[in-house]
Image: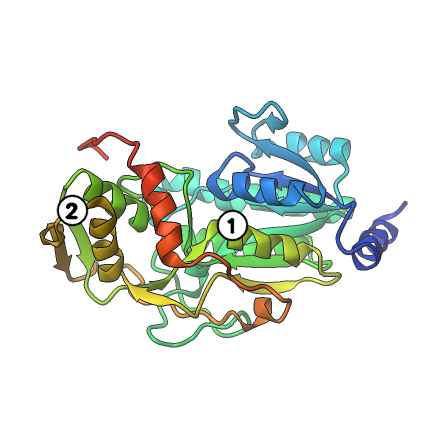
Amino acid sequence: MDVEQRSELTFALLETQGGTDVKVAVTGAAGFIGKWLTAELSSFHEVVMIDKVSTDPACVTANLLDEDVVRDWLIQTSPDVCYHLAAQVGRVFGEQDISHTVRSNAEMTTIVAKWCGELGIRLAYVSTSEVYGDQGDIECGEYGRLVLPHNLYGLTKRWGEEVSRLFAPKDLVIARLSMPYGPGVPPGRGRRAMDTMLWQAHHQKPIIVHRGAERSWCWVGDTVRGLRMLIEQPTGGTYNVGRADAPVSMAYIAVKACELAGAPTSLIQEIDPPGAQTVVKRLSTDRIRRLGWRPEVELDEGMTLVYEHVSKYPWQESQ
């Protein structure tokens, strides 16, 4: 079966069987989004997993920067779709080791995209809202303008989008995640601000808030449901995956963290944001909502679950 025939058969299955019986490969399956996504996909599809480190015996552990490894794994597992999540994530961690970040986000994606394209495997690339750069109060749509990101993470993820278009354009899915949250990762420096604020409140430590910062948070279970829905469409496209209907200030998140932890709000210290940081994120989510996606978990419920998770972590000043 040649590449074109394989591609047509995959999408015929998606259309006629409602997205069932499709084999999905997931890179970065041991990460935060990866664990939630593989759990979601496994209820509907066959899933194969790979990551550099994993405690799950069903997940292959291998170096995805080795082109032979990627090629051989894709040939052996023969998936219909590959969800590429493996990456160095985050603004802070992304610039601690710039060579590692560039290799993980640019080179690795090039390898995965190249072999997906050559083997006729549909690629779904998980990107980030950071690719839009700082556009102030402008609502960013998937096919609108991009400005230079403030950080290496955003820039290398944009590279990933472009190289995916170059090597695996056939019905390519690009999913730009925006503010997914939920239990599953430790708090601390460089980690998600919500988790760290909850952790700081639990231990009654100072909570730093950037003045004017605003986000719309999306429960990770809702996020991965959206990701599943994207590959169940017979054609590709670029989608913002997150919420635009529930923006809150980071000051609100800090106050809510104190309420959940029973801590005084006097812990909160508001400062001006650093220069190289997007203060406000406004994204259009009309495209994914037209597919029937709707968020189900609201912020108060979700933050309570995150608090239960991060409160188990002892305080460490080094974090």
Badge 2 marks a residue whose secondary structure is loop
Instruction: Name which residue lies at 59% across and 52% down.
Output: 125
Left or right: 215, with 244 as reference point: left
Camera-side residue of 309 and 6: 309
Q: Position of residue 137 (x, y in %)?
A: 34, 76
Camera-side residue of 123 and 305: 305
Q: Position of residue 92 (x, y in %)?
A: 31, 46
Badge 1 marks a residue whose secondary structure is helix
Q: Amino acid at mark 2?
A: Ala
Residue marked by disc 1: 221
* Quadrant location of the N terminus in the rendered image: top right
Instruction: Name which residue lies at 44% across and 58% down.
Output: 178
Query: Quick one: label 2, few (<14), some, or many (20+) residues within 10 Å?
Result: some
Residue marked by disc 2: 263
Q: Position of residue 190 (x, y in %)?
A: 30, 43
Instruction: Name which residue lies at 12% across and 55% down.
Output: 269
Q: Residue furthest right?
A: 1
Q: Amino acid at mark 1?
A: Gly
In front of the other: label 2 or label 1? 2
Residue 121 visible at all? yes
